Image (cartoon, rainbow, N blue to C red):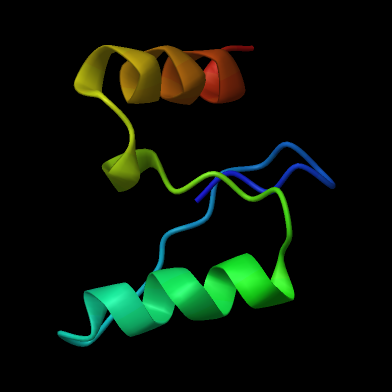
Amino acid sequence: MRDPADGHLYTIKHRGRIEATIDGIGKRHPGAVILNTLPFDEALTLFRTATSP
């Protein structure tokens, strides 16, 4: 997940409840981007941007 408030990437543990976790994050962190829900190229670009020095 990429939090728009700080731009950092966070790992999410879903414990098998993927859809419920995505919904919960959307409610608690409006505007957060879940990389696994994006097309691969877009997710990779966001990941590289957030992790580059």
Residue 9 higher or lower than 25, as above or below: above
Which percent across, then down, holds residue 20?
Answer: 36, 83
Kindly identify the residue that appears in the image at 53 percent across and 23 percent down: 51
Residue at the farthest left position: 16
Kindly identify the residue that appears in the image at 29 percent across and 75 percent down: 19
Kindly identify the residue that appears in the image at 15 percent across and 85 percent down: 16
Which percent across, then down, holds residue 44?
Answer: 33, 19
Closest to the observer, 45 or 52: 45
Question: Relative to residue 29, is residue 44 drawn left or right?
Answer: left
Closest to the observer, 13 or 52: 13
Q: How many marks?
A: 0
Closest to the observer, 38 or 1: 38
Which percent across, then down, holds residue 39?
Answer: 26, 24
Which percent across, then down, holds residue 28?
Answer: 71, 76
Residue 23 higher or lower than 4, as above or below: below
**Quarter of the image with the C terminus in it:** top right
Residue at the farthest right position: 5
Kindly identify the residue that appears in the image at 59 percent across and 24 percent down: 50
